[in-house]
Image: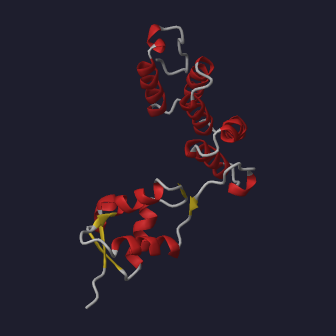
Amino acid sequence: MNNNSEINFHDEKFDDEFEEWEAFSALHAKEDYPGLVKFCEHRFNKYPDDQYSQYYLGAAYVLNGQYEKAINFMSKYHREFPENIDFQHVILDALFLSGKDENDFNWTEKPVIFRMSNEILDICYKFLKTKKKSRTIDDLYFKFQIKGYLLFSVEDLLKKLLKDNRFTISKAEDGIFAEVRVTSKK
């Protein structure tokens, strides 16, 4: 692959699905988003019914700053597979990056969105109070990540937990590896 987004789609390596996704990763790592869009469009045209091809093309449009195109493209697939959270997340990424919010789309199935709030801290507290061992911030963050779309970072979660006296944080300087437990009552 070269730097000017010229991709030879007739190269035999593009006939091997594993090799194709190595190319996807290489283009993404180089931040060659126009090349990534071309690559994903080629893959989608080859496998139009493949949900991964649909998802990756929508994600490529978002990475390339083509937010409306991503939303329009993913709308059809969201309607066909409303429970597919990958499709929901591409649409949400495009909405938020274009200055809109989740209410600016007609959802078939509305996604779960988590915003940093006291409710998030309460959920962490309820989870941790039954645990004998500390958990990392990353473990806590992941529990939300698998349930919905997060509008806060792992760093945001750490900052909020540090300010809440219900929690004891050790190794806070270790970022995602900081350990959290419920403060013991004496």
Total numbered labels: 0
Locate residue 90 relative to residue 165 in the image: left or right: right
Please tell me in which quadrant of the rendered image residue 162 appears: bottom left
Residue under the image location 67 percent in, 49 percent down = 95
Give how far across and how far down residue 96 sits, in percent. 64, 52
- Can residue 101 be seen here? The reply is no
Residue nearer the viewer, 122 or 95:
122
Residue 104 visible at all: yes
Which residue is painted at 66% across and 36% down in the image? Answer: 77
Q: Is residue 20 left or right of residue 63?
A: left
- Quadrant occupied by the C terminus: bottom left
Q: How is the image coloured?
A: secondary structure
Residue 23: image quadrant is: top left
Residue 184 appears at what percent x and percent y? 27, 83
Q: Nearer the viewer, residue 65 or 46?
A: 46
At a point 60% along the width and 31% down the height, the residue shown is 54
Depicted 152 relative to depicted 19: above or below: below
Q: Is residue 86 above or below residue 28?
A: below
Rendered position, 43 above or below 11: below
Pick whichever, 20 or 172, lies toward us: 20
> Residue 126 at what x, y percent from top left?
40, 74
Q: Taking 138 as reference, is 45 left or right?
A: right
- Horizontal and vertical percent for residue 31? 50, 33
Q: Residue furthest bottom?
A: 186
